[in-house]
Image (cartoon, rainbow, N blue to C red):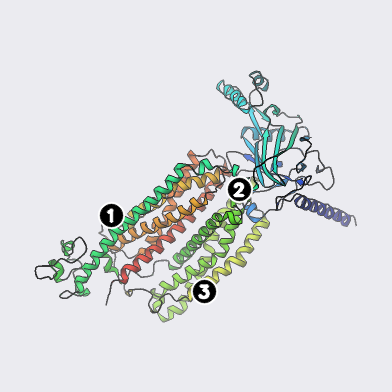
Amino acid sequence: NNAIKTMKQILSQSTLLTAASLVAVVTGDEYTHRYKKGDRVDLWVNKVGPYANPQEAYEYYTLPYCAPDTKHHPSNENGAFNALKAHSIGERLGGHALRHSGHDLLFADDKGGVLETCTTEKLTDEQTALFAKAANDQWFYQMYVDDLPVWGMVGEMLPDLDAAKSEKFGSDLSHLEEAVAKHAREGGALTPYVYTKRTLVVSYNDDRVVKVDLTSDPSSLKEVKKGMALTFELDIQWAKTNTPFHSRFDRYLDHAFFKHQIHWFSIFNSFMMVLFLMGLVALILLRTLRKDYARYALNHGPGGRDLEMAEQNDHHGSDDEDEDVDENGKPLLDEGGRPSGPGRMGVEDSGWKQVHGDVFRAPKFLPLLAAILGTGWQLVTLVMGVVLFAVAGPLHGEVHEERGEVLHAILVFYSLSSIVAGYASGSYFKLYFATTPAGRSKGGAAAGGTTQWQLTMGLTVLLLPTILVSILSVLNFIALCYQTIYYIPFLVLLKLFFLWVFVSVPLCILGTLLGRHAKLGGKKSDPFPCRVNAIPRPIPDDIQWYGVPANLIPFAGLLSFGSIFIELYYILTSLWNYKFYHVYGFLLGVYAILCLVVCMTTVIVVYFSLNSENYLWQWTAFYSGSSTALYVFLYSIYYFVFKTSMNGLVQTSFYFGYMLLISLGVGTLCGTLGHWSANKFVRTIFQNVKVD
């Protein structure tokens, strides 16, 4: 009976606490952002942590701050102090853990300011060490009022405070910094101090909160000592303003940084690079191809030899073969109007035409490549969808104004785009499976084909999630060990698992089945312009350096990276340096430029590869585009060393873990685009070649 009574008491207390937190949300209308005079406005505390390490963040009350002496004090019944706010999946993935501060804010209070105080117990050794660490490592805290964030510093490392005051120390923080700098030059020891008085000014326009300012009074700095009780004060003030509600977030956006002339110049520079590459492709490839087609026409024209006779002379070509056509690609004629030179007796095919019987042969590791390309098309769709969703912010609400909005959009687009991954991988596998030995044999097509289809489907479903889970599990374990708020709770993991199992996986399987039964050849039974020989052609070894794919792939990745590295700097600064990225129009333009540059550089690499009679172009095309990821990761190392002050295991692990995921995503996306452009190019040039 006693156990039952105890259980009832616990349940009743938890129910009251839940009801109090719900009332806290309903009373202060944070969702419509409209209040009446005297309505309660909640002040939420989010996190504390070192300013240099964005991901090393802890819950606010990890530090021994005291509960304010209000009705929400833990000693009072039904208090909302430290109650956890309801969070979306995107908010939890973004490292948000808002808890009620316990302070009472009444909308448009005309009392001229409310001073709320609280006093801690006498500090223990552990609590003193926590405050000292926070002051030494420059910890900051974050709060929210009506979804508007404010920040403040926990404390400072200072010399003797009396000595600082003797040097005209006042309420101006610059005087404090001067005192610290002078003391540091003299080599003196510094002592931890914490701010004990903060002023919160909430500005409102009509019935809406439009501005929040938080200042810490330097004259309230108190030295942290064991056995000392600290009294904290929060001065709450309300002020009217004419600032419109729709522009209340503009003060958080660093327009001078994101819309700097360098940003505009980088877009213009990347656009000029696209024009240059387009001209290069037109000048080199199209003009060269015209010569190739003209030379090929000579072999099959009147008086010329057929393809078999040309192939017999593969190793006896003339050094003057380039003289068969003029600079415009037209055949040279003699006085009688007939083709002159060696072409008159028939000229051997150029390099890329000699591999017409092998160029559409299935690549090695076909199921793996099909799964990677399917994942790549999913990422292409995902990035385009999220960027367009962000660009359309004025229609549905700016994404940078809502916590976790971008991560929520990523989850939705990832789940829905799984059907794209399945269809792309399934159709690609079907396209090339007929050219494999198992596809040619009747028994193999039935038995081996089923196994290969299942393998392709399984790889498509598991490839990206396996990489994500592997890296994020390590990061989650580290965050859990250090008790930071960036660990993913079990319930969130369970929701993500259900989202993957019941939405993503079925759509991926459906897409694979649709791709398997798709008609890829149109009206023709053969989807390729040329038939594939039963016996593979040997690939020559003695080729020029520019015909070796390994020599060209790094240059292709460098050009692609060169078109985005300025924008990459702005993105990394937003991720790791507390800035709100909001120039999604720039991002959309850079994304389009990246796609064009990747496609054109890959076409050039594949052309040189085919000209060297290397018909294994599928993986070459993918590597050509995906090599961009290597430069992205190398740049992230440079950014970590020279542009940040990050330190410690937690922050270093999160930085390189996330950058590894970003680099792999960029590589897969660019590799897929490169393969697509190369496939279009190869089909186009071989469609114009008639082979018996």
Q: Check the image and report above or below for 238 versus 674.
A: above
Q: Is the C-beta separation of discs 1 and 3 under 8 Å?
A: no
Identify residue for label 2: 478
- In space, the residues marked 1 and 3 are separated at their CA atoms by 43 Å
> From the viewer's perspective, is 334 left or right of 208?
left
- The amino acid type of the residue labelled 3 equals Leu
Q: Position of residue 320 (x, y in %)?
A: 15, 62
Q: Is residue 652 visible?
A: no
Q: Nearer the viewer, mark 1 or mark 2?
A: 1
Q: Residues within 10 Å of mark 2 (few under 14, many from 20)?
A: some
Identify the mark nearer the N-term, 3 or 2. Answer: 2
Identify residue for label 3: 513
Q: Position of residue 549 (x, y in %)?
A: 33, 57
Identify the mark nearer the N-term, 1 or 2. Answer: 2
Which quarter shows the C terminus?
Answer: bottom left
Q: Is residue 195 visible?
A: yes
- In space, the residues marked 3 and 2 are separated at their CA atoms by 40 Å
Find residue 346 and report its image quarter. bottom left
- Which of the labelled discs sits on residue 379, or is there none? none
- For the point 63% across and 37% down, the residue is 139
Q: Check the image and report above or below for 678 versus 513.
A: above
- Which of the labelled discs sits on residue 545, or is there none? 1
Q: Residues within 10 Å of mark 3 (few under 14, many from 20)?
A: some
- For the point 44% across and 73% down, the residue is 430
* Direction right: furthest residue: 1
Identify the mark nearer the N-term, 1 or 3. Answer: 3
Instruction: Name the secondary structure under disc 3.
Output: helix
- The amino acid type of the residue labelled 1 equals Trp
- The amino acid type of the residue labelled 2 equals Ile
